[in-house]
Image (cartoon, rainbow, N blue to C red):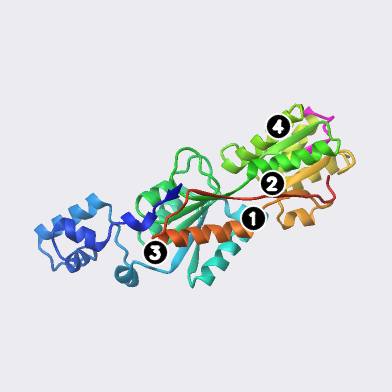
Amino acid sequence: MSIGPAGADRPTLETVAARAGVSRATVSRVVNGSTRVSPDIRDAVLSAVEALGYVPNRVARGLVTRRMDAYAVVLTESAGRIFAEDPFFATVTQGVIQELDAAGKEMVLQVISSERSRERITGYALSGHVDGVMVVSLRGADGLPQLLAGKGVPVVVNGRPMGRSAVPYVDVANAEGARQAVRGLVDSGRRRIATIAGPPDAPGAIDRLAGYRAELRDARRRPIVTHGNSTRDSGWSAMRRLLDEHPGLDAVFVASDVMAQGAVRALRMSGRRVPDDVAVVGFDDTEVARYTDPQLSTVRLPIPDIGRTMARQVLRLAGGEPVERGVVLATELVIRESS
């Protein structure tokens, strides 16, 4: 299934002028606050602006070309997780930069950390300061992508959206990757395999948990599930809960490398040896996996390709081309010292 170019229905000065029955120059004067327009014409133009949902771009170049040659990456996570804890975001962004640079475009980084920043970033995109938006790490039925796309902004999201949404997305085979991880643990002889799942409102975490459950069901094993919030501390706390409630477990599949690093620390503090007593497999294959002691077995994601693919898709949308509804990239199980 293809999605039509999101920018095709974006109201322009010309469409406002046609609706108001005036010239493009008159519309430009009204939206830029000129007093050299009669009240009747001003009212007609403002009525057309409201009816069409037109948002004036006050950057001179954009008024002429409707192209800024800049694209926003919007990260919907805390600044601490983005910049200090999880390398996933930097690596995705690096992929975006590489693709945009090759196309002669610029990237603008935006972080939603509060409702105020959400409103500011939404207004920034709707005002035409960028030609398209890539949204990373959505939670729940976040309406931001649909809002922007509905106003004619080309939008691509990282991860399948929850609920009904026609916004194009780039995802990875989360469920299959989880199945690969659990299958490897089953094949190595592990009997009581728990999971530390990610946030229950994150589509990727939901799919990884589904893959874990499906593989254990096929192996006729009972699932043992707890949740973390994708931080190192939450992985530590979740592992402590698992050990308290299920002291006989001999393996744990963790929905991210960062949480897995916390889980390994909790196991060591409890006197459990990794992997002799408890095997651990993470998910992502960021540099965290290689610097954990022991080095983490994990499910490798093509993280730079996620960014590159998102950038290619949003460039196509902004250029008036249709794109696929969803692009899903493959995963790969990497065995290291922890399993």
* Element at label 1: helix
* Element at label 4: strand
Mark 2 nearby-residue class (10 Å; few <14, some 14–19, many ≥20):
many
Residue 81 spot, x, y in % from top left: 62, 52
The chief SS type of the magenta part is loop
The residue that mark 4 highlights is 225
Q: Amino acid at mark 2?
A: Ser
Tell me the residue at 50%/66% (across/down).
Answer: 107
Residue 242 spot, x, y in % from top left: 76, 33
Task: Kindly check if marks 2 and 4 are in contact, taking CB atoms under 8 A apart as contact.
Answer: no
Q: Earlier in the sequence, mark 3 or mark 4?
A: 3
Vertical relation: 71 (above or below) 180: below
So how many labels did they put on this image? 4
Which is nearer the eye, 244 or 29?
Answer: 29
Which is nearer the eye, 288 or 119?
Answer: 288
Q: Earlier in the sequence, mark 2 or mark 4?
A: 4
Q: Which residues are magenta?
A: 245-252
Q: Amino acid at mark 1?
A: Phe
Mark 1 nearby-residue class (10 Å; few <14, some 14–19, many ≥20):
many
Residue 88: give its label: 1
Task: Kindly check if marks 1 and 2 are in contact, taking CB atoms under 8 A apart as contact.
Answer: yes
Give the quadrant of the C terminus.
top right
Question: How far apart are the two marked residues, 2 and 4, measured between alpha carbons?
Answer: 15 Å
